[in-house]
Amino acid sequence: MSNRTFTMIKPDATAKGYTGAILDQIIKAGFSVKAMKWTRLTPEQAGLFYDIHRERPFFGELVEFMSSGPIVAAILEKENAVADFRKLIGATNPAQAEEGTIRKQFAASVGENAVHGSDSDENAMIEGDFFFSKLERF
Ligand code: RTP
Ligand code: MG
């Protein structure tokens, strides 16, 4: 089991000024930051990142949303990182997310849900490599 995961603070959350509060909760939950950048995806890049969802009905909306404004991308380290981070952010749909989770507090809808968290160790590696070179990570 790997001790790293990958996250993005999504454009809805950066636009609403939630970046600092979300990072604060991530760090207080015991994750340490191994790489971080403030950037913006083109529609092509957003489509590549979410390539696995290309055939889903929400793909067009997802690409439009994820390229609509700045994001914060980060590699995080903690024991049991992938599962613990998914628990911290809560269900994809904030209406179903548990009290105290990041999506419950900061997300507005299933589409615009404030944060991303990798769903496996393998995807955490792939997604970290998508954003960061060796020089940009500890
Ligand atoms: P993420 O990959 O962003 O961490 O989210 P997740 O694993 O909880 O959910 P996933 O099934 O991987 O979906 C990726 C993102 O697509 C958008 N989505 N919209 N309109 C819809 O029904 C719908 N379903 C998913 C969300 O932004 C979701 O986080
Ligand atoms: Mg996912």
Image (cartoon, rainbow, N blue to C red):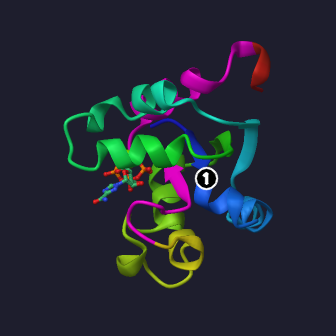
> Residue 118 or 73: which is nearer the viewer?
73
Task: Locate residue 112 relative to residue 92 in the image: left or right.
Answer: right
In this view, 45 is above or below 50: above
Task: Locate residue 16 relative to residue 46 in the image: left or right.
Answer: right
Which quadrant of the rendered structure holds the C terminus? top right
The residue depicted at 50 percent of the width and 85 percent of the height is 99
Q: Quadrant of residue 28?
A: bottom right
Image coordinates for residue 63, horizontal then vertical, percent: 42, 40
Image coordinates for residue 111, horizontal then vertical, percent: 40, 60
Number of residues whose C-alpha sits closer than 10 Å to that of mark 1, classed few (under 14), some (14–19) or many (20 or more):
many
Q: Which residues are magenta?
A: 109-134
In this view, 11 is above or below 13: above
**Whether residue 136 is visible:** yes
Residue under label 1: 11
In this view, 18 is above or below 51: below
**Whether residue 118 is visible:** no
Image coordinates for residue 81, horizontal then vertical, percent: 54, 48
Image coordinates for residue 61, horizontal then vertical, percent: 37, 49
Name, please, the residue furthest toward the top.
Answer: 134
Q: Quadrant of residue 129?
A: top right
Q: Secondary structure at mark 1?
A: helix
> Residue 68 or 127: which is nearer the viewer?
68
Q: Quadrant of residue 29?
A: bottom right
